[in-house]
Image (cartoon, helix red, strand yellow):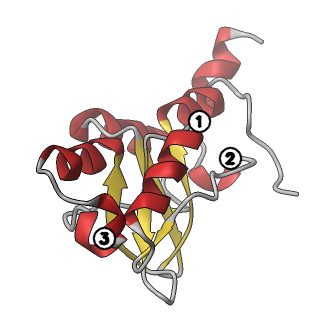
Amino acid sequence: MSLHAVATVGLRSIQQIAKLHDFRFHHDQNGLAITVELLTSSLPGAPVVDAKGRFIGFISQFDVLSVLEAGRDISQLTAEEIMVHDHVAIHISTTLSEAVKLMKEKHFLVLPVEQNGVVIGCITRQDLLRAWVGLGLGEKV
């Protein structure tokens, strides 16, 4: 791969990433189940969606740790009670460059991706790096 080819890949959009992570929590999902999913996933957090799939919040490992540190019983809480309400998502048409800039500015590890107002998946910094150098770009199957 030439350096020129690597540099031009950065102009592509999230839509061209072959696979998004299909990882999200439902608003009424149990806190203990969320904790288990976070422990068994490679992702440090995920968006929380309502019954229609709309993005309403985000839960990270830090959010769960904060609940536990406060002495609350995680098994008695739902995603809505754990999630952070101040949330940011990107549209499927967002460029890789815009997504990288947002992740860098906000210190995000994961970004939810929306299309038509519904969360369709999420991406990580590693996904963006792969896409930037041309690995993981291509037609969705």
Residue 114 drawn at (x, y percent): 50, 69
| Callout 1 touching callout 3 (CB < 8 Å) | no
Eye-nearest disc, 3 or 2: 3
Side (left or right) of 18 relative to 113: right
User: Residue under circle 1?
Assistant: 127
Mark earlier in primary sequence (3, 2): 2
User: Residue under circle 2?
Assistant: 17
- Of residues 31 and 25, the one nearer the viewer is 31
- Quarter of the image holding residue 73? bottom left
Give the alpha-carbon distance from disc 1 to disc 3, as whole Å: 34 Å
Q: Secondary structure at mark 3?
A: helix
Local crowd at mark 2 within 10 Å, few (<14), some, or many (≥20)? many
- Of residues 35 and 101, the one nearer the viewer is 35
Residue 81 drawn at (x, y percent): 24, 71
Q: In this rendering, does residue 115 appear at all?
A: yes
- Of residues 3 and 114, the one nearer the viewer is 114
Q: Residue furthest top?
A: 2
Residue drawn at x 75%, y 48% is: 18
Local crowd at mark 3 within 10 Å, few (<14), some, or many (≥20)? few
Residue drawn at x 69%, y 50% is: 16
Q: Residue furthest left?
A: 70
| Callout 1 touching callout 2 (CB < 8 Å) | yes
Q: What kind of residue is marked 2?
A: Ile
Q: What kind of residue is marked 3?
A: Gln
Mark earlier in primary sequence (1, 2): 2
Residue drawn at x 34%, y 48% is: 60
Residue 62 drawn at (x, y percent): 27, 42
Eye-nearest disc, 1 or 3: 3
User: Residue under circle 3?
Assistant: 76
Q: Is 84 placed above or below 119 here?
A: above
